[in-house]
Image (spheres, grey):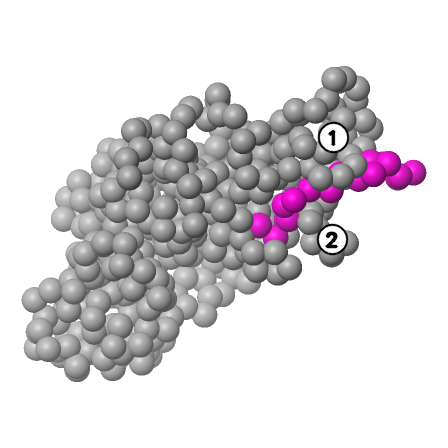
Amino acid sequence: MFTLMQGNSSVLDFSAFPDTCFIYYPERVLRDVKSFRSALNCYFPKATLAYSVKTNSHPAVLNTILDSGIMAEAVSEAEYSECKRIGFMGDHIIYNGPIKSKESFLRAVEGGSIVNIDSLTELSYLDSITSGNKARLGVRLNVNLQDVCPEEATFEEASSRFGFRVNEEPFKEVTEAFRAHPRLKLSGVHIHRTTRNRSVRFYAALARWVGKVISEYNLKPEYIDFGGGFSAPYPSAPTFNHYAGAMARELRLCGVNLTDTEIIVEPGTAVVARAFDYLVTVTDVRATSEGTIIITTGTRNHIDPLFKQNSISHELLRFNNSTDKQVPVQKVEGCTCMEFDCLLTLRNAPALQPGDKIIFHNVGAYTLSLAPEFIVTLPEVVTINKNDIHG
């Protein structure tokens, strides 16, 4: 369930909001989609933007993406079906992921979707394709960080379990199967990989690597799908222009014809992270010898379900305070019964009281999608729409 509200976020009366809720600003998604698309168009004559549904699959987000005109990228049969339910046409969906049922694979192909093959099992589905006029089929290449960009190989493991390694027999089977097929051709390559740093250096290295693979294996892709993993445009982060410029430069140096080759990117965090805030309400204040404990209606499970964030941008909304007295330590705790459910620690901040609220910013990526329904269910999503509201 979500509620539509009208207004400018800078003058919203947050005291009237639910005690706990996500706050969604569609115009922020549209702004970052426009910015990313503009950056791509500066460097690539043929560029396609597809939103990574897994990053945040809330219907309000998907409707915004549909309205923006860009594609959707689904990595499961459930996501593909949800995109269709929202209103995406088949030719506006990219179907990725390591497990595609034969039925969903063929439905996507017949519907004109881009489908990137991830396994020999999926390759075996080719013989069941009844027509090839709509099919846009690619292959996912296995990206080993140690080979592509050793400087970024510290993110979990350098190797990957996805896609085909170009120097091994299964990849040869894929290319030969397409060459032997009477109606189908290998249209593209998919090279998604994520690094912790989300650096421009990595995307430049990835472009250089795929350019060499295309040359060495005499591939003639109509498209190169770089996947996602790009940073949201925070003040200290790379810009979309930085990413696109570095990728274009390296592809040209490798001899890739950018006039004829479609470049696809599948951002998630980059376009949705800044579109969501999370609002919680203080319910109790407890003074202890170790500091003040602030109990809230929220939980860290909702904004950091993997418990990996060192800090989350936040704002204090004080409604019940008549003093600006600074408190040395205030530990802001969640509503669950788990000791580790701590949202943040405030140091030398104004004293909070029951009824005050805290807004956590930039929590649109991998929060609603990953947050467990542990002890409490996901809260309401309130959509702030600056335009007139009808219905």
Residue 382 in percent (x, y) is at 45, 40
- Per the rendering, the mark at residue 159 is none
Instruction: Bin the neighbour count of mark 2 within 10 Å (Cα to Cα): few under 14, some 14-19, many 20 and up.
Output: few
Q: Which amino acid does label 2 sit on?
A: Phe
One can see residue 2 in this view? yes
Q: Residue at x 51, y 38 (%)?
A: 277
Question: Badges 2 and 1: C-beta atoms under 8 Å apart?
Answer: no
> In the displayed structure, would residue 99 be above or below residue 353?
below
**Secondary structure beneath disc 1?**
loop
- Residue receiving disc 2: 340
Span shown in magenta: 286-302
Q: Is residue 390 magenta?
A: no
Q: Is residue 300 magenta?
A: yes
Tell which of 182 and 116 is nearer to you: 116
Residue 214 in percent (x, y) is at 25, 59
- Per the rendering, the mark at residue 353 is 1
- Residue 8 falls in which quadrant of the image? top left
Query: Which tag, 2 or 1, sits closer to the chain's start?
Result: 2
**Secondary structure beneath disc 2?**
loop
